[in-house]
Amino acid sequence: MKFIVSSSQLLKHVQQINGVISANTVLPILEDFLFEIENNKLTIVGTDLETVMKIQMEVEAKEGGRVCIPAKILHDSLKNIAEQPLTFNIDKNNGIEITSDNGKYKVMGENADNFPKEPLPETAESISMPSSALVTAINKCIFATSTDELRPAMTGIFFELTSNRITTVATDAHRLVRFSRTDVSSPEKVSFVVPKKPLNLLKNVLPNTDEQLTISYNENHLFVKQGEIQLVCRLIDARFPDYKVVIPSDNPYKLTLNKNDFQNALRRINVFSNKSTNQVALSITGSELQLSAQDVDFSFEGNERMACQYNGEDMQIAFNAKFLIEMLSAADTPEIVIELSTPTKAGIIKPTEQEKNEELLMLVMPLMLNN
């Protein structure tokens, strides 16, 4: 088997798929990429048994074939080769010889028959959506997923498809993000939880454009196909908490702030907060917001004032500043509104303006004020 490929194109595709490969894997073959050639098309496959990712590219080849190539050595060598055609020669014992303009490199491959088989989308339902819709949904929610393996459902993003919208939700029990789009729909009502790793891979490789992609799903797996990119992942088999009961229906007090000013003030004040809680207290009186933080152990203290628009009773409430900073990054408007009721109930953060087919809602639990 022999083929010729552009070094920079191959590196680009190898980098896109490299994130699938696990650092500490049980099976040595999982440290390899599967290379499959058919009709002048090279398909590169990587897997960690939970997630399979495939990317196709054009090559020059007279015949088809399959081989497994060690991922790390291929990736590391391509990074240091300038743009040029590379010739891959694979002998019948899976020995691989790579020839460049001024060098020859040899590496031992493995038998492609030992590479794990991927799940097939039998009995899978499908929907189409713009690639940017999925990328945006992932970006808006993924930071709020939990790292607690004892609550597996919270370690991924919950997808809810209905006849008039798609909703994605993530929570770690301290904060919750819900993002809906009304320009994507499903013929039947369905929901599933997708792990964080494949979603991170998707947001890095999918184009943030209106190009269409297809999402298919069955009881156990999710299949995403966009152009030359395909991803299959196992769904999280756990029940996502009922997020609707957590969102307060009545938060009458509204605090409107300049997003960047508020975010920068939080970053400055958080330097002086307790490092385990990141607690910043917000004191709201009339049209002034005061931010304060302290770390009693080190005698650190920080205070700042900023202008705001507020209608409601004067209030003092505390939040985790790190959470607020991350959540504000998900809002794409110059101003945000925080809806409050009492210092012990969740605050709701929303952008002041939303795209006509999008709705973003973020909820954050308050911290106990240590007066």
Image (cartoon, rainbow, N blue to C red):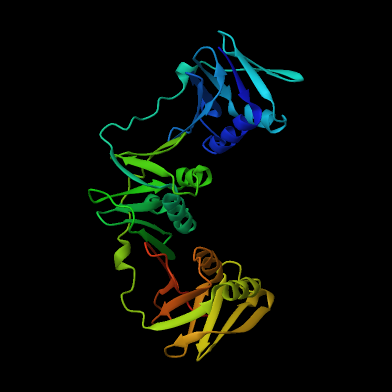
- Picture quadrant where residue 297 is located: bottom right
Instruction: State the residue at coordinates (29%, 67%).
Output: 245
Please indicate, yes or no, whether residue 150 appears anywhere in the rendered image.
Answer: no
Left or right of residue 187: residue 236: right
Q: Is residue 60 above or below residue 121?
A: above
Does the image show residue 94? yes
Q: Residue furthest right?
A: 102
| Residue 190, percent from left and from top | 26, 49
Figure check: 66 above or below 49: above
**x and y percentages locating residue 123 in the rendered image:** 25, 34
In this picture, residue 199 sits left or right of residue 28: left
Give the residue furthest to the left.
188
- Residue 23, how many percent across, how many down? 57, 36
How many tags in the picture? 0
Q: Decide: is 210 above or below 349.
A: above
Residue drawn at x 23%, y 51% as measured from the top left: 189
Q: Which quadrant of the rendered structure holds the N terminus?
A: top right
On screen, residue 361 above or below 220 = below
Residue in front for this viewpoint, 265 or 133: 133
Q: Residue at x 39, y 60 (%)?
A: 179
Residue at horizontal 49 percent and vertical 47 percent from the top: 203
Quarter of the figure that contains the C terminus:
bottom right
Residue at the top extreme of this rendering: 92
